[in-house]
Amino acid sequence: MFVTRMNIQENVSLEPYNTFHIDATAKEFVEINSLRDLQQLLKNPEYMAKPTLILGGGSNVLFTKDFEGLVLKINIAGITILREDEAHAWVKAGAGVNWHQFVLHCIRLGYGGIENLSLIPGTVGAAPLQNIGAYGVEIKDTFDSLEAVDRRSGEVKTFYHQDCQFGYRESIFKNELKDQYVITSVTFRLHKKPIINTTYGAIEETLAQMRSHNGSPAVPGIQEVSQAVIQIRQSKLPDPQVIGNAGSFFKNPVISAEKYEQLRQTYEAMPVYQLPGHLVKVPAGWLIEQAGWKGKRIGKVGVHDKQALVLVNHGGGKGEEIKALAYQIKEDVYQKFGIEIMPEVNII
Ligand code: FAD
Ligand code: EPU
């Protein structure tokens, strides 16, 4: 029995809780504001029998149907500096803290390492799940540890870097331990003497423009890098408040150097990133654009006109329609290039 009855609501529209703005319904919905709330809920035998879904900011999920179970919306707050030494600060944030607000907070404190990850939507708690990455940085680069609650026993476990099996948009929580743990906090080891990383994409170019337009300092700091990243992202990616989307719908596929050589005979301009072990990563956005999908609209859903990797809900679209569009794109890319692209978004 519940010691204190938590506020479990019934038949809640998930539209405000996912950035695709899909109007699916959760049979039951509860907001989790603390570790105690969560442990109390897990103790309830009624809960054990129910299908459950953990939700942060809903910026990497696609609902294709109503959810016939209990949605746990994680709101656990709080940012604490655990300790510091000469070079580093260990900063812990609750799983429900907004990721971008966390980045800005760390920048204000002068702590570097996550400024390139500015403006990624969602929560701190979901960030390790797919090892969020952008502009040459992934959270694994500054990740120290996380705390998570075992959904079956209610016990808290600490996972260190080596436990998480981080990869490109991957971690153990998306694979072997899928749906087994609720992440309640994450600790980062940030740099007190930040190392600036401006090598990726248009960061250098944007910083130069910022210098000439508004007199930014000649040597950029973490604040300027963050601003440059924000500017680049705003120029390419649709704002989910305005147009429903979940960022990149697919992951960038990895192919062999031999396969790349074959394709290069036909597609000379195909951009790639070299990886170790005779592998190359191909931007899926390029493949999708070449296949003719960029800016296409099918009813209420479509492909973003500035970034073909982003599928959008123009308003009132259904999750099933986005899934069907994604499937058509995947098939078409495979027909044209012989490359299989896999979704990054969690399809529910
Ligand atoms: P949700 O969408 O709520 O959940 C995602 C998954 O994590 C689900 O499977 C959920 O069950 C699980 N989950 C959520 N919280 C927890 C928890 N506390 N414990 C256990 N499991 C949990 N991603 C990048 O990597 N790089 C980018 O540059 C990037 N750009 C984006 C741009 C836009 C415009 C959008 C909309 C998305 C972008 N994303 C990007 C994807 C998204 O922002 C990230 O995946 C983010 O980490 C998702 O956080 P969330 O809280 O919204 O997670
Ligand atoms: N490209 C095209 N057409 C397009 C889109 C991209 O030709 O419509 C080409 C670009 O010209 C460029 C290359 O593809 O040569 C890469 O494009 P971009 O720099 O925009 O990055 P991306 O590979 O499409 C990845 C991440 C993003 C992340 C950016 C910046 C994945 C799946 N996506 O996108 O992450 O913000 O790099 O680092 O790895 C997300 O995960 O949701 C996400 C937005």
Image (tube, rainbow, N blue to C red):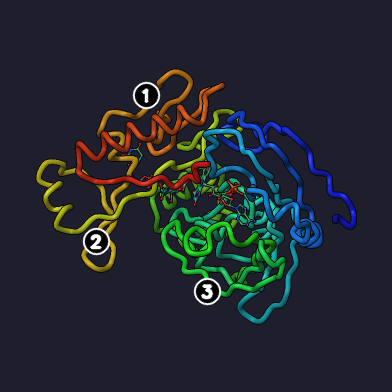
Left or right relative to 238: residue 123: right
**On residue 296, which mark appears?**
1
- Above or below for 130 versus 297: below
Left or right relative to 276: residue 127: right
Labels 1 and 2 touching (C-beta < 8 A): no
The structure residue drawn at horizontal position 77% and vertical position 59%, both measured from the top left corner, is 78
Give the mark count.
3
For the question of whether residue 116 can be seen, the reply is yes
- Above or below for 118 versus 36: above
| Residue 15 on image: x %, y % | 64, 31
Residue type (three-letter) at the residue carrying disc 2: Leu
The structure residue drawn at horizontal position 67% and vertical position 49%, both measured from the top left corner, is 50
| Residue 296 on image: x %, y % | 37, 24
Give the label, 1 or 3, closer to the camera: 3
Pointer 3 local density, CA inside 10 Å: few below 14, some 14–19, many at least 20: few
Left or right relative to 34: residue 173: left
Q: Quadrant of residue 20?
A: top right
- Above or below for 328 versus 275: above
Q: Alpha carbon of mark 1 to alpha carbon of mark 3: how far? A: 42 Å
**Earlier sequence position, callout 1 versus callout 3:** 3
Pointer 1 local density, CA inside 10 Å: few below 14, some 14–19, many at least 20: some
On the image, numbered disc 3 is attached to which residue? 163
On the image, numbered disc 2 is attached to which residue? 279
